[in-house]
Each structure stands twice: as structure tokens, then as C-alpha cells.
Amino acid sequence: MSTFEEYAALARHLSELRRTGERNAAADTRRRSALQGAVDQLGHRLAGQEVRLRQLRQVIREPAVPAVPRATAGTPGEPVPAVPGDGPPPAGAAPQPAYPELPNGSATLALPTSPVPTVPAPRPPAELDPAAELDRARQAADAAEAALARTEALGQQPLLLPGLSPLARALAVYAGCLLATAPLMLMLDLGYRWGAIDTFTQLAWTLAGLPTLAFFAGYLLLGRYGQPPLVVGTPPRYRYLGFLVTFIGAPVLYCGFIELTLGG
């Protein structure tokens, strides 16, 4: 017969088991709450990445993939291929079998027999660690974030001289457009020396006409190719800087031509 001490020890053991179960349940609840919070945070992060990716897709104007039309029988305007034996027979002719290579009567076509494939028994799914899977998803999100940041950095650079600042880009563009007029300036100088044009025409085109062409060419280039794809608004084109570069640089360039030709 059990004694009172045995019942007391059993009660203490059961109480200890109950407290252990409560502690384990509380720890499991905290772990689940932490995992759920991490999952929610990762979900918000992925949602933000999706919005940014949609914006990039709109910027690059990615065309939608056209759906492949399915050929359906009976579609208006589409001829349906004729099948042997299909359709009504001609008047006065005996109906032909659908497959004339098979004899009429009770003959049957023997189909080749194939062994029944053996399907392996499904294996129970392996136990997955939620924390490890969440860490893998977080690493994938980090890699996607880095790639997205690099793409956005490239999208914030214009096609025209992407490595320069806006001011340096404008200076280089206006100076390059002025240098592009150098052959015309040389032709005007040679035409004046050969007597083909007079002094007023030569100076008017050299000091006013060609700088004007260079200014508007640089202005249009900066507006067309100086706009980063991901930046909204008109890029700075530095009109006053372009005016100074072209209209002050033209006399300097012309003096350089004179020095090279007369000095040589």
C-alpha cells in the first residue's frame, strides 16, 4: 500500500513537470513572437523592394511579354485542318472508315504493352529550422538590396559623361561643341585669305555665328543626354556658363589659329 510520502513525491514531480511545461510553452511563445516579428519586418522590406523594382520597370519601359494565342477549332477566319474520315461522305458513296488501314469486322489493333512504372513512396518532409530559413531569406534580401542600390546608382547617372559632376559636364560639353566648330573656323579663315569672303562675313561667322551654333548644340545635348533616367525634372544646363565658354572661347580659338598659321 502506497504511503503518504510517495503521494507527496509524486505530487511534487507532477508539479515540477507542469512548471517545466509552462516554462517551455512561454519560451516557445517568445520564440514564435520573435520569428513572427522578423518575418513581418522582412515582408515590409520585400514590399519596399517590389515598389522600387516597379518604378525601375516603368523608367526603363520594359515591354510586356505578349501572350501566345492558342489555336482553337472553330475560330472564325481560321481554317480547320481536315481529318481523314471527318465530315459527311459524298452522295452515293459508301461511308469510309476513319482509319482505312485497319480491317473491318471484329479485328482489333493490338497495342504494345508497357510495364507499369513504379512510383516511389513519398518520403516525409525533412524538418526545417525556421530561424535558419529566415536567415537565408534575409541574406537573399540583402543581396537583392545591394543589386537594387547599384542599379539605382547607375540610373541616377546620365548617358552623357556619367563620371563628371553637372557643372564639369556642362563645361566639357560647351567646350567640346566649340572645338567641333574649329574646322569651319579654319575654312572661314582660309576663305578670307584667298579672297572668297570679305572681312565682315569672316568675323561675323567666327565671332558670332559659330559660337551661337556651339551654344545651342551644347544646350540641346545637355537637355537630351544629360538627364539621368531616375531623376525627375529638367537637368541644369548652365546657360550663362555656356554663353561665356562659347562666345569668349571663340576669339581665343581664332587667335590660336592666327598664331599657328602666321607664326609657322
Image (cartoon, grey):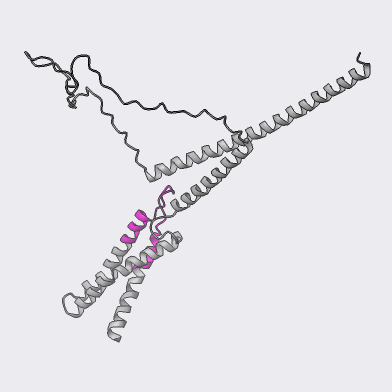
| Above/below status of 246 relative to 61 | below
Q: Which span is picked out in magenta? A: 217-246
Question: Quarter of the image holding residue 56?
Answer: top left
State the quadrant of the N terminus: top right
Is residue 53 one of those drawn in magenta? no
**Image check: 65 left or right of 43?**
left
Percent coordinates x, y for residue 54 in the rendering: 44, 40
What residue is rendered at 18% in x and 19% in y? 103
Quadrant of image for the C terminus: bottom left
Return the residue nearer the eye: 156 or 20: 20
Considering depth in this image, is 236 or 201 the residue closer to the camera?
A: 236
Is 203 rendered above or below residue 76? below
Q: What residue is drawn where x is 20% and y is 24%?
A: 76
Left or right of residue 80: residue 231: right
Please state the horizontal and vertical placement of residue 12, each as a whole percent of the image: 87, 22
Q: Residue furthest left?
A: 92
- Left or right: residue 218 compared with residue 135: left
Q: Closest to the observer: 1 or 68?
A: 1
